[in-house]
Amino acid sequence: MYTAEFNYHKAASVLEALALLEKHPEAKLLAGGHSLIPAMKLRLAQPSALIDVSKIAGLSGIRLQGDTIVIGAMTTHREIEHSSLLKEKCSILPEQATLIGDPMVRNKGTIGGALAHADPAADYPASMLALGASMKIENSSGSRVVSADDFFQGMFQTAVGAGEMLTEIHIPANTKGAYEKFAHPASRYAIVGVAVVKHSDGSTRAAVTGAGASAMRLAKLEGGATSGLVDAADLLSDHFASAEYRAHLVDVMAQKALARV
Ligand SMILES: Cc1cc2nc3c(=O)[nH]c(=O)nc-3n(C[C@H](O)[C@H](O)[C@H](O)COP(=O)(O)OP(=O)(O)OC[C@H]3O[C@@H](n4cnc5c(N)ncnc54)[C@H](O)[C@@H]3O)c2cc1C
């Protein structure tokens, strides 16, 4: 299967990428291409142009800034999987990265691409909500930082607007977390994935991905409950799993994650 024809632009900086986006409003940003290219091959997406942002210097890497871990949007799943800084200060992310797809997907796919794509079955959205992360979004007139709670707005929908780009992910350091996923046997995407994170102030945050139209906080677990965490009426139902089965899996995955935390 081949994509429709498109023009290719390679951006050397965020400023250049934003200028290209302004000049070509129908264009799509290209990060690792592991969600966008399959969609283009299936003709679900037919952008007239791609703006390759995957090699912008300074957009990948993981660093500690005070009590915050800053992850560049073009950091690959593989870099997250092997980061010693994350293993020490935010181990849920390397743990989660090892569960994404296969080595090829992890070598090319990026955290920024995954978050901007907001696939309802993607792994990171659950940990972003449980970690209380925030996302830096840039456009030609400046930047803003949006909390994960406000970032995910629905199926494949985020706070990143037209002409904008996700550039950084900000995560509080020194958390203890666990992620439990009931994976689709072929793609490894989450049918249900639950992230539970204990924060340094003693609070616990939890979230689920795969179960609904987009990742969501598990308020009942945060309040101390360990079963009946979600209402099946709010969940997806498809030929992989009914809404009732997904609701059951949420409880089971949550109990497993909680026990490990
Ligand atoms: C076989 C297979 C198995 C997979 N399994 C899993 C899995 O188990 N779990 C999981 O979570 N994911 C899985 N994925 C998805 C994978 O993680 C992708 O890498 C990810 O969803 C998209 O990241 P990317 O860097 O490849 O983005 P791309 O495909 O390049 O882009 C995705 C979308 O985000 C936009 N975009 C990219 N970067 C930015 C940015 N900085 N700012 C704004 N918009 C941007 C693009 O324009 C595009 O619309 C799988 C993919 C494949 C092909």
Image: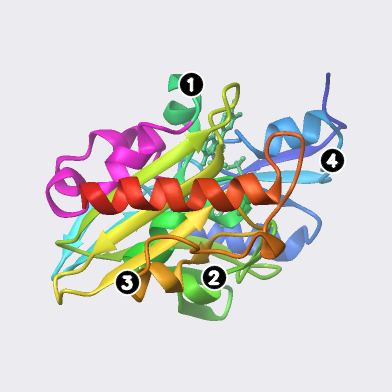
Which quarter of the figure has residue 227? bottom left
Residue identifier under label 3: 224
Crowdedness near tag 4: few (<14), some (14–19) or many (≥20) residues, C-alpha within 10 Å: few
Callout 3 crowding tier (Cα within 10 Å): few <14, some 14–19, many ≥20: few
Q: Is residue 87 magenta?
A: yes
Range drawn in magenta: 74-100
User: For the residue with label 1, is its CB less than 8 Å from the closest atom of ligand 1?
Assistant: yes
Reading the image, the residue beneath label 4 is 44
Q: Mark 2 sits on what residue?
A: 151
Please state which of residues 192 and 165 is positioned toward the viewer in this rendering.
192
Q: Is residue 253 visible?
A: yes
Q: Looking at the image, tell me whether mark 1 or mark 2 is earlier in sequence order.
A: 1
Q: Find out whether the residues at labels 1 and 2 contact each other: C-beta distance under 8 Å.
A: no
**Quarter of image, ligand 1:** top right
Please, what is the dominant secondary structure of the magenta stretch?
helix
Q: Left or right: where does residue 101 sit relative to residue 63? A: right
Q: Secondary structure at mark 2?
A: helix
Q: Which mark is first along the chain, 1 or 3? A: 1
> SS class of the residue under badge 1?
helix
Q: Quadrant of residue 99?
A: top left
Q: Kindly identify the amino acid type of the residue bearing the numbered disc 4.
A: Leu
The amino acid sitting under disc 3 is Gly
Q: Quadrant of the N terminus?
A: top right
- Mark 1 = which residue? 104
- In space, the residues marked 3 and 4 are separated at their CA atoms by 42 Å
Q: Give the distance between the C-alpha atoms of the residues marked 3 and 1, in whole angstroms.
A: 39 Å
Colour logic: rainbow
Q: Is residue 80 left or right of residue 66?
A: right
Amino acid carrying mark 2 in the image: Phe
> In the image, what residue type sits under mark 1?
Met
* Residue appearing at x 83%, y 30% in the figure: 42
